[in-house]
Image (cartoon, rainbow, N blue to C red):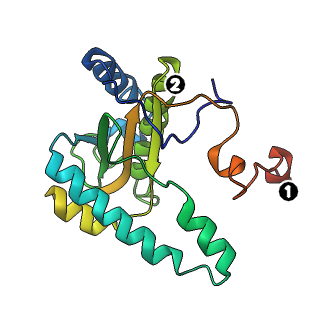
């Protein structure tokens, strides 16, 4: 399950059953959270107009991001990648962190308020693994401007965007990440990420 938990960008058209979506959200909310604050806020994006505006925003942000690559070949390779499935994923969801939740009474965040956001990431991870068990894929869109997306979705000012997720059945199953298959970046040995002091 962990080996094939790919960031999915290519989806089948078939919808995800509502019972499965509700179960994914229930599983997400079983995540641990600082002070039991449960700061995650899930916004299911069902409007075709909102989806189209988000896709256009992401494409524009991706175009600007491509200019970071001074090497022409790498810039062309970047532009050839499919970096999101916003237009074709059956489900689109924005996940926010409530940076001022009433639950939890501030426990555990006096010196590390970012723990609220880390807690929200754990909920996303729960959702991702629960999806994978059901054969459902998830893609995390990161090439966007959080403030612009928050304004577009008209959320409270104290909510911070953590993720925009594309959810649906993968068009293909492959144990190798797409970015590795496309020659962008191979997975490096886990042992090179562990240190002793």
Quarter of the picture containing the C terminus is: bottom right
- Residue 1's x, y, as percent? 63, 23
Q: Quick check: marks 1 and 2 in contact, CB under 8 Å?
A: no
- Classify residue 135 as left or right of residue 30: right
| In this rendering, the label closer to the viewer, 1 or 2 | 2
Q: Under tag 2, what secondary structure?
A: helix
Q: At 50% from the left edge and 20% from the top edge, which residue is drawn?
A: 135
Residue 21 rendering spot, x and y as whole percentages: 31, 23
82 relative to 166, above or below:
below
In the image, residue 112 lies at what x, y percent?
46, 58
**Is residue 155 visible to us here?**
no
> What residue would you read off at disc 1?
197
Q: Nearer the viewer, residue 148 or 62?
A: 62
Q: CA distance from mark 1 to mark 2?
A: 36 Å
Which mark is drawn over residue 132?
2
| Secondary structure beneath label 1 | loop
In the visual, does 31 lie left or right of 103?
Answer: right
Q: Residue at x 76, y 48 (%)?
A: 187
């Amino acid at each position: 399950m962990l080996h094939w938990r790919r960031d999915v960008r290519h989806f089948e058209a078939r919808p995800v059953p509502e019972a499965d979506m509700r179960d994914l959200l229930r599983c997400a909310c079983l995540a641990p959270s600082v002070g039991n604050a449960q700061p995650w806020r899930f916004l299911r994006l069902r409007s075709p107009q909102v989806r189209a505006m988000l896709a256009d925003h992401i494409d524009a942000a991706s175009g600007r991001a491509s200019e970071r690559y001074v090497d022409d070949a790498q810039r062309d390779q970047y532009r050839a990648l499919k970096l999101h499935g916003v237009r074709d994923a059956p489900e689109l969801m924005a996940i926010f962190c409530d940076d001022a939740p009433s639950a939890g009474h501030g426990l555990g965040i006096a010196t590390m308020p970012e723990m609220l956001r880390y807690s929200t990431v754990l909920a996303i991870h729960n959702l991702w693994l629960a999806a994978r068990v059901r054969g459902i894929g998830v893609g995390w869109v990161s090439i966007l401007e959080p403030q612009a997306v928050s304004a577009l979705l008209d959320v409270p000012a104290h909510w911070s965007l953590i993720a925009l997720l594309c959810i649906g059945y993968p068009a293909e199953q492959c144990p190798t990440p797409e970015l590795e298959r496309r020659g962008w970046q191979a997975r490096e040995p886990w042992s090179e990420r562990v240190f002793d002091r």
